[in-house]
Image (spheres, grey):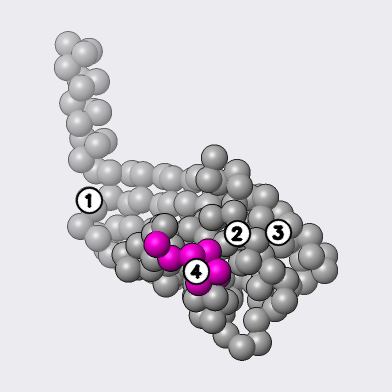
Amino acid sequence: MVELVAKRYAKALMEIDGGKKVDAFISSLSAVASALKEPKAQEIIASPLVSAEEKVSLITASLGKKVDPVLKALVKVMGEKGRLGLIPDLTAILQFEKKKESNSFVGRVESRNALDAEELRSLEKALSKHSGAHIALEQVITDLNGVKVEVEDLGLELNFSKDRVKTALLDYIQKAL
């Protein structure tokens, strides 16, 4: 339910000026969204003791002096409807829609050993070909005994674990006997 409401707000923002202001909206809302993740801020937003007008003024003040009038109006409407807590969800949806529009996504490669630049480019190229989107991968060194590739925004996850292959091979041998 929360996501559906946030999607409606995101759709409205994306339709303003043909989507030209989306980057500015994302940048303004990202700062507010990160602030709203703090427990104290969540407490204020959820508190019935703080009026909707006070909540709206706190958020509009955090947006800065040169806040877009559309964004200010959106915050006011969200405050009147008691939906200021949706700002982090709204920001995430706007960021995803922007990535989807540009067809460019970022993923992670987790492994014990670092892949060289050529292997990483080859993997990016294969995933881009498979998904039909441009994918950039970031290397993360972990204690994983294998390789895990994840592009969260596309719901894409590949996992090759040596331990898992070993277990599957032993199971296959046991079943064959």
**Furthest residue toward right:** 17
Query: Compared with residue 146, is residue 47 higher up or lower down, i.e. above or below?
Result: below
- Quickly name the residue at label 3: 101
Q: Choose mark 4 or mark 3, whichever is in front.
A: 4
**Furthest residue toward bottom:** 65
First-in-chain label (2 vs 4): 4
- Quickly name the residue at label 4: 55
Q: What's the amino acid at mark 3?
A: Glu
Q: Choose mark 3 or mark 2, whichever is in front.
A: 2
- The N terminus sits in image quarter: top right
Element under disc 1? loop
- The C terminus sits in image quarter: top left
Specify start and end residues of the magenta stretch as a single range: 49-56
Q: Magenta stretch containing residue 76, yes or no?
A: no
Query: Compared with residue 153, is residue 164 higher up or lower down, i.e. above or below?
Result: above
Element under disc 4? helix
How far is disc 4 from disc 1 in space, using C-alphas?
A: 48 Å
Element under disc 2? helix
Rendered residue at 48%/58% (across/down) = 85
- Quickly name the residue at label 2: 80
- Quickly name the residue at label 1: 145
Q: What's the amino acid at mark 2?
A: Glu
First-in-chain label (4 vs 3): 4
Q: Position of residue 106 (x, y in %)?
A: 51, 62
| Residue 51 visible, this orientation | yes
- In this image, 169 relative to 104: left or right? left
